[in-house]
Amino acid sequence: MDEGIRQITRRVILESAVRNVCGDRQQDYGSPENSFRAIARFWKAYLLEKYGMDVPLCPTDIGLMMALFKISRIVKGRFKEDSFIDGCGYLACAGELAETDRGETVPGSGGR
């Protein structure tokens, strides 16, 4: 392997995701719990206004849907390491939130 060219391995992807989720992104955007809860409120309001759908969303749903967004980019686009890193990060956040939010939906959603 040429010097200066980094091989993309599962370790590199996972370690990068850890740095992002537990460092950079948390410092830039705050905790996933707060961020995903806010996103759930925005998406819920959008779906209600545009389609008349009162969709129950919890923070875990947001992490899972963001991971699906990254998977869609991976499937439809060219190789981009960041999509794999971000997908791992979203799934890690969703996994942690699934343990704590227990299906808690954003206010006014009528539960699950």
Image (spheres, grey):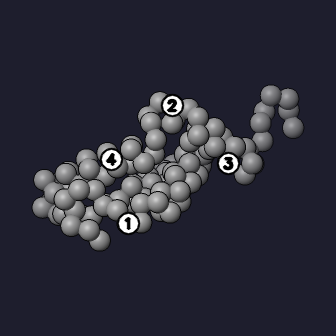
Determine the CA span between mark 3 and mark 2. 19 Å
* Residue at 34 percent of width and 49 percent of height: 37
Which label number is shown at residue 48?
none
Q: Which element type, helix, strand or loop, lies under badge 3? A: helix
**Which percent across, then down, holds residue 86?**
55, 46
Circle 2 is placed at which residue position? 27
Determine the CA span between mark 3 and mark 1. 27 Å
Query: In the image, what residue type sits under mark 4?
Result: Ile
Q: Which element type, helix, strand or loop, lies under badge 2? A: helix
Which label number is shown at residue 39?
4
**Which of the two discs, 3 and 4, labels the residue nearer the N terminus?**
3
**Which percent across, then down, holds residue 56?**
27, 64
Query: In the image, what residue type sits under mark 2?
Result: Gln
Q: Nearer the viewer, residue 61 or 111?
A: 111
Q: Is residue 44 left or right of residue 91?
A: left
**Which of the two discs, 2 and 4, labels the residue nearer the N terminus?**
2
* Residue at 56 percent of width and 32 percent of height: 24
Task: Mark 2 vs mark 4: give the one in front.
Answer: 2
* Residue at 19 percent of width and 59 percent of height: 108
**Which of the two discs, 1 and 4, labels the residue nearer the N terminus?**
4
Which label number is shown at residue 14?
3
Query: In the image, what residue type sits under mark 3?
Result: Leu
Cβ–Cβ under 8 Å for marks 3 and 1: no
- Quick check: can you spot residue 42? yes
Task: Mark 1 vs mark 4: give the one in front.
Answer: 1
